[in-house]
Amino acid sequence: MNATTAMLEEFLPADGPHTRPGPKEVHLWSANLNPPAWQVDRLYPLLSPDEVDRAERYRFPQHRRRSIVRRGLLRLLIGSYLDLDPAGVRFSYGKRDKPSVAEGSDGATCAAERFHFNLSDSEDLVLYAFAFGCELGVDAEMLRTISDAESISKNFFSAQECEVLLGVEPERRSEAFLNCWTRKEAYIKAIGEGLSEPLDRFSVTLRPGEPARFLHFADRPEEVAAWSLFHLLPAPGAVGALALRGQGWKLCSRSRLMPCGIAGD
């Protein structure tokens, strides 16, 4: 057992070995960003100077803690997958700040070139996704009342989605809104375009209980069959989504980190 694996096990329940994602396989991890203080202290030394600086700039302690845990766990997981020193992992960023493992990471092998990851956080929840050979995007939101869901949807959703949203019973409309929002966010994160990609140029399902899938891409109808979309339940009281190119992907819920739960449909 190397030092990275040993440290990772401090944050995991005992549920079997930790292995790399296989072909057409995505590993999903969820974590609570409010762990005991000793775990925050263990993760802090893994951060790079710029990550430390970013964390220390937060005014409120809970935001500082979330930043430390979010990046520390990311480094720990990447180090385990690629057999790297977590503190030696270096990141590069795409044109919309989408992160990837940089070639100059200490001890990095060619596996890093095919390794893809994404993460999302909401309040004290963080969700990670890892795969080899395919860009992916993930998003998570804590369920809450969205009082201006209708007005926001008119600005960001497609006409088709707005119509469906208005047809959802009022007590579940916020959930439907967040279903739609996380699915759109997951897609634009997967393609690395951020909000420069107009959210109303494509449509997704959003009704509670309806399977997640793409319905329409303006001017690119072939994209509907080119992508997979999954609905996630990353923790009690939360919803999420995973988007990635291709079909036939298998989602693997890995061990819960400090602890949350995850499931998909």
Image (tube, grey):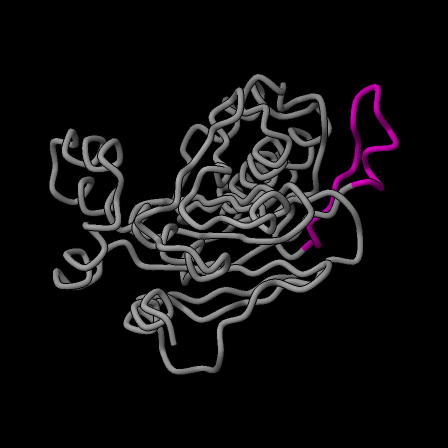
Relative to residue 165, is residue 220 drawn left or right? Answer: right
Residue 185, image quadrant? top right
Q: Residue at x 47, y 26 (%)?
A: 97
In reply to whether residue 54 is colored magenta, the answer given is no
Q: Is residue 154 above or below residue 70?
A: above
Q: Nearer the viewer, residue 43 or 79?
A: 79
Quarter holding the N terminus is bottom left
The magenta stretch is 210-226
Relative to residue 150, is residue 209 drawn left or right? Answer: right
Q: Is residue 260 above or below residue 63?
A: below
Residue 206 percent location from the top left of the image: 64, 43
In reply to whether residue 223 is colored magenta, the answer given is yes
Farthest residue, direction front: 107
Q: Nearer the viewer, residue 93 or 198?
A: 93
Relative to residue 203, is residue 110 drawn left or right? Answer: left
Q: Residue at x 23, y 46 (%)?
A: 68
Q: Nearer the viewer, residue 75 or 28?
A: 75
